Image (spheres, rainbow, N blue to C red):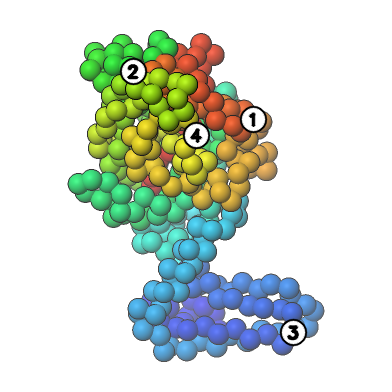
Amino acid sequence: MPTNSMGKDNKYYQVDVTCTSSKTTGLWDYNAWRLNLDYIESNSKCNLTFTSTLSKADYDKYIESGVALRRNTYRGKDITKYYTGEEKINDKDLYKQISDGTFDDIYVGDYIVSEHADESGGKIVWLIADLDNYLGTGNPNALTKHHVTIVPAYKLQDSRMNPISSTLAGASQIEEAKELAGYMGSEMYQTTLNTVYDKYIKPDFCRSSSDCHIIEYLNLVSKSVDEKATNQYVQNTGASSGWSWETRKLDLMSEVNVYGTTVWSSSGWDVGADNKQYAIFRLKPELINKSVSAISGATTGNYWYWLKAVVSSTNFASVAGDGGVFLESASNPTHRGVRPRFLID
């Protein structure tokens, strides 16, 4: 019987799968509402039994299990047609699959190919980095919207953190930030990320005030630096010493987001709510510093990009082309890549 005639939205069906082959196994995907088969043999037959005996609470457990599977599975599928609405699953486009929290056919590593190009001229590819990983974060208002975390497959442009080699107050030389230091006081935070948002992100995910899927969230950011403080690695002086919860639309990633641990971060204020490694970097660690050619449209090769962590009174952290973490002068004349993250619903 076709699954679209089962009245899925009206009853909570338990689906049992039995196959005649001893090797062939079947699993019903409750989120996508479809059958997945493994080790298919010729002449093998599988029977599906739909029984409307589940309570809503029990059915929801299957949905939650499906979300957990998607967060722990790298797939790498082009889901651009869900984004454009050309294709739907369970009558839902990409945004509906996200906003209702089912993530019906969205996995870590899936990607959207943009119509727009990055600074180098390569087509922008947006990667699904994680699912619902910021739920419950933020103070005083915790994030309650279902979401996916997006990162570009390649840096969007090259920029400096500050015009001078300093992470201290006034280093950005921006009037509004003259009393601020660290990440919040940087030129990157004060102006560059706003430009990146308007140029690359807003055109793809916020096409009008009534059609905007970029989430504003609360993020803890460093806003002062004690230049005499000895940071956790002793040989460098200068450490983040103050913080603030700020309403954000995009940010640079933390060391923990990328590597799962701190490396050069000077204090806990460099991490804050960015205290979890994104699933994509745990499941596919080569994507930390390499844009894989198999991802359609993305510029390929190893590259550098900034992280939001203060390292010392002169340096911020960055991801190096070899995959390691580097302590980088805030005004590096060759600049480094801007690879921010943002959330959509």
Mark 1 = which residue?
Answer: 322
- Could you say which disc has been placed on residue 263 in the image? 4
Residue 269 placement (x, y as % from top left)? 33, 34
Residue 329 placement (x, y as % from top left)? 47, 16
Residue 58 visible in the current orientation:
yes
Please name whichever residue, 316 or 37, is drawn nearer the observer in this view of the structure.
316
Kindly report the distance in space between the C-alpha atoms of the residues bearing marks 4 and 2: 19 Å
Q: Amino acid at mark 2?
A: Glu
- Could you say which disc has been placed on residue 18 in the image? none
- Crowding near pointer 3: few (<14 within 10 Å), some, many (20+)? some
Mark 3 = which residue?
Answer: 21
Residue 118 visible in the current orientation:
no
Mark 2 or mark 1: which comes first in sequence? 2
On screen, residue 251 versus residue 322, left or right, reads left
Q: Amino acid at mark 1?
A: Asp
Q: Tell me what residue is drawn at x 21 percent, y 48 percent.
A: 141
Looking at the rendered image, the disc whose residue lies closer to the viewer, 2 or 1, is 2
Mark 3 or mark 1: which comes first in sequence? 3
Looking at the rendered image, the disc whose residue lies closer to the viewer, 4 or 1, is 4
Q: Secondary structure at mark 1?
A: loop
On screen, residue 345 versus residue 289, left or right, reads left
Kindly report the distance in space between the C-alpha atoms of the residues bearing marks 3 and 2: 69 Å
- Could you say which disc has been placed on residue 227 in the image? 2
Q: Amino acid at mark 3?
A: Ser
Q: Secondary structure at mark 3?
A: loop
Q: How many marks?
A: 4
Name which quarter of the figure residue 48 lies in: bottom right
Q: Secondary structure at mark 2?
A: strand
Q: Tell me what residue is drawn at x 60 percent, y 55 percent.
A: 75
